[in-house]
Amino acid sequence: MSRQETNQSSGLGSVRRRAVDPTQLVTTAPMDPKGSPLPLAIRPAADGVALAEWAAVHRDEVDSYLDRHGAVLFRGFDMSDVDDFESVANALVPDLFAEYGDLPPESASARVYGSTPYPPDKMILFHNESAHLPTWPLRQFFFCVVPAQERGETPILDCRLVCELLDQQLIDEFEQKGLVYVRNFAEGFDVPWQDFFKTSDRAKVERVCAESGIEYEWTPVGLRLRQHSLAVTRHPRTGERLFFNQIQLHHVACLDPETRDSLRALFAEDDMPRNVYFGDGTLIPDEVLHRIGVIYEEACVEFSWERGDMLAVDNMIVAHARRPYVGPRKMLVAMGQMVGSEQAAAN
């Protein structure tokens, strides 16, 4: 084979040693051609396609897919471990974030994390990653090392669609007021504030909060934090209106009834371990959260994971969740292209 023939197969690993039309290396089609446009599925159209090489060449193309579809599922490629995953994620986002404290780090990499340590029999509710913080990743990647024996799907949801389905007066209220996330570090609930801030010096905690724009208060229960954030915003690339937040993860109404009732028996409303309010401090009615939950379930799309699957999402266009599962399950996570409220507000 000539050098020219080998070079023509850019994006192919050493397994395949013949010329291939580069436009035929992959196929693209919605997972459900008759239904939701997300996720877009990308599959190899030839043997031995090296996804990391293809992704490096077609990064702009994948970005355009994410602008339109919100999520891209790479399926059928030869990927098996953290190195394969990190190579592809890094080809798509060269500035993978290496300082994320909310997920357990994967020992083999400083820029890849394990999935949220959460009971497998409980659902992780819908959220946009780090939407309650001053900055968040625009890109997030999930990789299936070991699919669950049963269930364990990752439902995904188009946040542009939520803005269309929710009552427009309510959407306008969320956009105008924003949200305030409240966290109380009460003894015996969640992690101690000393572990969270990695210090027992109150002055250091106060300094960190002041530098991060977090309101703090020492109460008889413990430490209370108040973080003002967005609820509805515009996408920094497309300018589209998005329902962007973590309201389901924080609002007391979204807890299972037994947990909610037990917490309300122990704490006053202001002292709940976690809660979320409108940005002016007023309550978000429980019935609003019920309506949001109904829309999420009606509008979401989910699929069963296969070993080696990689899902890329635009974290502002798409919210994600996790269904309960049975049996061993291992997922890896990476993220990058950090943005903040100023960039979103500019649109």
Image (cartoon, rainbow, N blue to C red):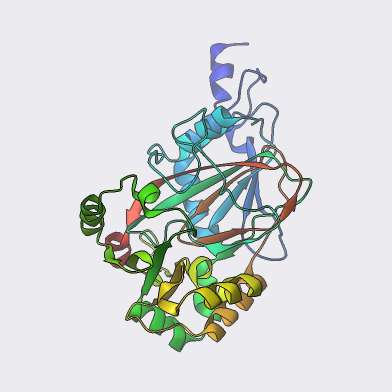
Q: Residue at x 52, y 52 (%)?
A: 313
Q: Quadrant of the C terminus?
A: bottom left
Q: In the figure, residue 300 lies in which quadrant?
A: bottom right
Q: Residue at x 34, y 49 (%)?
A: 197
Q: Please indicate, yes or no, whether residue 221 appears anywhere in the rendered image.
A: yes
Q: From the viewer's perspective, is residue 279 above or below residue 184?
A: below
Q: In the figure, residue 44 lies in which quadrant?
A: top right
Which of 214/31 is in front?
Answer: 214
Image location of residue 262, percent across then percent down: 59, 73
Q: From the viewer's perspective, is residue 301 above or below residue 175?
A: above
Image location of residue 253, percent across then percent down: 55, 77
Q: Quadrant of the N terminus?
A: top right
Q: Residue at x 38, y 67 (%)?
A: 221
Image location of residue 66, percent across then percent down: 51, 54
Left-right relation of 284 to 201: right
Q: Please indicate, yes or no, whether residue 347 appears anywhere in the rendered image.
A: no
Q: Residue at x 54, y 12 (%)?
A: 3
